[in-house]
Amino acid sequence: MCGELRPDLVVMDISMPNMDGIEATREVKKRCPKAVVLVVTAHEDENLMLKAIRAGAVGFFLKGKDPTQLIGAVREALEGESPMDSKLAGRLLRRLAVEEGNPDGSSEPPVKGQEAKAPLPVSLSPREQEVLGRVAEGKTNRLIAQELHMSLSTMKRHLERIVAKLGVSDRTQAAVKAIELGVLRESVRRK
């Protein structure tokens, strides 16, 4: 239906009968790349959140919250934000930061002095790093602009450059990829 209707927004559940929401998200993004996919689920699982983001979802909203929060999440997603459950997103980002520092993939913190010091495969300006760090903290575009004393349009331009440099499609994927590449390792570990 997505190819036929060309929706601006798809609200996706994870648990569905014929195809799970992760695979369905991949199919939606393949057939309709501009569609915004917001996952709405009862599963409080950071592994599912990561799979959904990697499949192309911009947000991960947990069922059972006040319906007005869902309306707010839909609006945020359509405005280019990444509505996420903050506790779940925080757990995911901290886990990714720890795993990124361990070549063996273990979740144990790396031994001091044994972290990889390879050069980063992308080059972000200090300002872009500030913006991306705040995106990874789950802050909205408006709040990031306020904190960094810039206009919203300037902040969005920084974000567009970050997304392009990292080769991803949205701010959520940028935060995840930056952690995987080690760009945000230290700021996330300090949290």
Image (cartoon, rainbow, N blue to C red):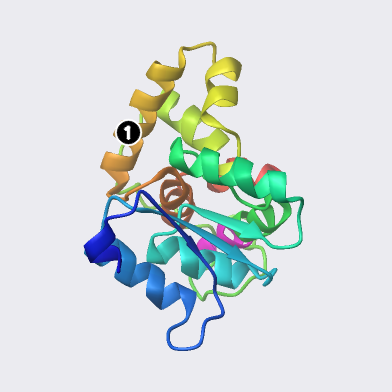
75 versus 44 height, above or below: above
Identified by mark 1, the residue type is Glu
Q: Which residue is mark 1?
A: 160
Q: In the picture, residue 54 is in which quadrant?
A: bottom left
Where is residue 140 shown, x and y percent of the image? Answer: 57, 32
| Highlighted range, magenta | 94-101
Where is residue 128 shown, x and y percent of the image? Answer: 41, 29
Q: How many marks?
A: 1
Q: Name the residue rendered at 61%, 51% in the picture.
A: 84
Where is residue 164 shown, x and y percent of the image? Answer: 26, 41
Q: Would residue 96 be counted in the magenta stretch? A: yes
* Camera-side residue of 25 and 191: 25
Where is residue 63 shown, x and y percent of the image? Answer: 70, 63
Q: Name the residue rendered at 56%, 34% in the picture.
A: 134
Q: In the picture, residue 147 is in which quadrant?
A: top right
Q: Name the residue rendered at 33%, 54% in the picture.
A: 7
Which quarter of the rendering shows the N terminus? bottom left
Secondary structure of the residue carrying numbered label 1: helix
